[in-house]
């Protein structure tokens, strides 16, 4: 068992939210009970995740997408009221970390996605093969070495590899004849990082979403673009961090996957 503040301190020390300019508050977003025995992790603080955490008798929830974002009206009605009502009624703490969770060098969304895809090894922070790019240096790029997985070296095989690993359809825009010597990636809605990836020398870019301009840029610049799903690219960091912290503090942890086609 641990307490609410001790858990917050460990999350903050690990993820260092003070380093980032973010779109919402990082840390404890909703205060619940003081003592914590079990934590549930998930991608988004949706009603479905909160209800699943209640069923599991969790004392805390740890997510990437919390309840509060810059630009919200601040009113507590409708879906917001219902999510808050459930958390408060069951005395559940909600911890949320957005960009800090993307950026952690070994446990974050980008590192974990790179590990899942075979772009980096489990100790990504020790790899000299990784460079960073884009706003707040959140983008990752790795060189594809001669001994790398053959699936990473061509756009067609990379497309199939992404769909196999993530177990979902992936939208790809690419020239099948272009060889891949470097792959850039940034989880979630990072389509705006594509130009920075091109400028950094990437031959392919992997992210969660694609807007209208990216298809044209991919064709005109000869850099492959793969939109793999916002949720699909960000479902690895939260359980990795929560499992690490739960092990440190001797509490129970359970990751709950709430399916999301986005």
Image: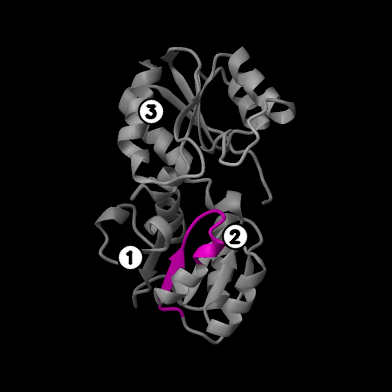
Residue at the spot of label 1:
131
Element under disc 3: helix
Its colouring scheme is: one colour
Q: Earlier in the sequence, mark 1 or mark 3?
A: 1
* Mark 2 vs mark 3, CA separation in Å: 29 Å
Q: Are marks 1 and 3 in contact (CB under 8 Å)?
A: no
Residue at the spot of label 3:
246
Residue 38's place in the image compared with 126, above or below, is: above
Residue at the spot of label 2:
228
Element under disc 2: loop
Q: Is residue 189 magenta?
A: yes
Element under disc 1: strand
Direction from residue 225 to residue 129 in the image, left or right: left
The outermost residue toward the right is: 78
Tag in front: 1 or 2: 1
Mark 1 closeness class: few <14, some 14–19, many ≥20 residues within 10 Å: some
Quadrant assignment, res 36? top left
Mark 2 closeness class: few <14, some 14–19, many ≥20 residues within 10 Å: many
Name the residue rendered at 37%, 20% in the picture. 5
Q: Earlier in the sequence, mark 2 or mark 3?
A: 2
- In the rendered picture of this protein, how many numbered marks are placed on residues? 3
Q: Are marks 2 and 3 in contact (CB under 8 Å)?
A: no
| Range of magenta residues | 180-193
Quadrant assignment, res 75? top right
User: Can residue 138 be seen by looking at this rendering?
Assistant: no
Query: Viewer-proximal residue, 75 or 81?
Result: 75
């Amino acid at each position: 068992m641990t307490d609410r503040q001790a858990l917050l301190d460990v999350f903050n020390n690990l993820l260092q939210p003070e380093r980032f300019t973010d779109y919402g508050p990082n840390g404890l977003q909703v205060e619940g009970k003081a003592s914590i025995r079990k934590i549930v992790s998930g991608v988004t603080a949706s009603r479905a995740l909160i209800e699943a955490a209640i069923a599991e008798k969790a004392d805390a929830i740890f997510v990437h997408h919390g309840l509060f974002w810059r630009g919200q009206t601040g009113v507590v009605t409708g879906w917001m009221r219902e999510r808050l009502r459930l958390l408060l009624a069951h005395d559940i703490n909600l911890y949320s970390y957005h960009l800090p969770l993307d950026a952690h060098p070994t446990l974050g969304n980008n590192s974990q996605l790179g590990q899942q895809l075979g772009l980096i090894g489990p100790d990504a922070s020790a790899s000299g093969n990784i460079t960073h790019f884009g706003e707040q240096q959140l983008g990752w790029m790795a060189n594809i070495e001669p001994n790398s997985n053959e699936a990473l070296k061509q756009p067609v095989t990379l497309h199939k590899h992404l769909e196999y690993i993530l177990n979902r359809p992936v939208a790809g825009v690419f020239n099948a004849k272009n060889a891949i010597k470097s792959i850039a990636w940034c989880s979630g809605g990072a389509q705006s990082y594509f130009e920075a990836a091109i400028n950094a020398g990437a031959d392919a870019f992997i992210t969660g979403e694609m807007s209208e301009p990216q298809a044209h840029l991919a064709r005109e610049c000869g850099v492959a673009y793969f939109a793999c799903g916002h949720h699909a690219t960000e479902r690895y960091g939260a359980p990795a961090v929560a499992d690490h912290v739960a092990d440190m503090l001797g509490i129970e942890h359970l990751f709950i996957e709430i399916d999301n086609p986005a």
